[in-house]
Image: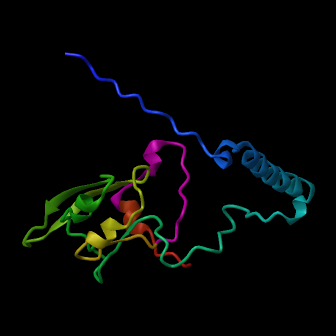
Amino acid sequence: MAIKIKKIERKKMPLLQRLYLPYIFIGMARTLSHFFKNLLNSKNIEFLEYPEQRPSDITPRYRGLHRLLKDEKGALKCVACDMCATACPSNCIFIEAREIPNSKEKEPIKFNIDLLECVYCGLCVEACPKDAIRMDSGIFTKVGNAKSSFIADIVTLANTKQGDF
């Protein structure tokens, strides 16, 4: 049995598509003009003295670092239902629960969020039936020198306050 080979003719590119090189030079010229303009006129460049100054364009709806809410008695609102961990697309939330004596509910004994894996999508906040987790801390950066410093535990999350924007 013979194999049939179909030869496909390549279409010729139009002249505008063949002349991509001028557009590269136009883009390079614009980039270099901005570079030299900023190099020669460096007093007019705007910058922030980070972390003392915060960006002015952070809105109240900004999703910052997580925080766990407490009820009127000072206990965590979280009932360790695991819905936030189930809704999380990056699987960065780990909850270990225990049953409360003389109650039908549970409470978390471990509640860890790996901030390096978190994509800050807010699905954990939307999934929580008790409104126990929020992302309105106003903290938009976290600095550390070890991977373990980017794992927010239950104490850190419970003591994080709501930010002011």
Q: Which residues are magenta?
A: 137-154
Q: Is residue 150 left or right of residue 19?
A: left
- Name the residue: 29% across, 80% down: 71
Where's residue 52, x and y in %? 69, 66
Task: Give yes or no for residue 157 being in the magenta stretch.
Answer: no
- Name the residue: 41% across, 65% down: 66
Q: Is residue 128 left or right of residue 37?
A: left
Q: How many marks?
A: 0
Q: Is residue 66 above or below residue 163?
A: above
Quadrant into which the N terminus falls: top left
- Name the residue: 88% across, 58% down: 42
Q: Is residue 161 above or below residue 96?
A: below
Task: Give yes or no for residue 141 being in the magenta stretch.
Answer: yes
Q: Quadrant of residue 126?
A: bottom left
Q: Residue furthest top?
A: 1
Q: Quadrant of residue 43?
A: bottom right
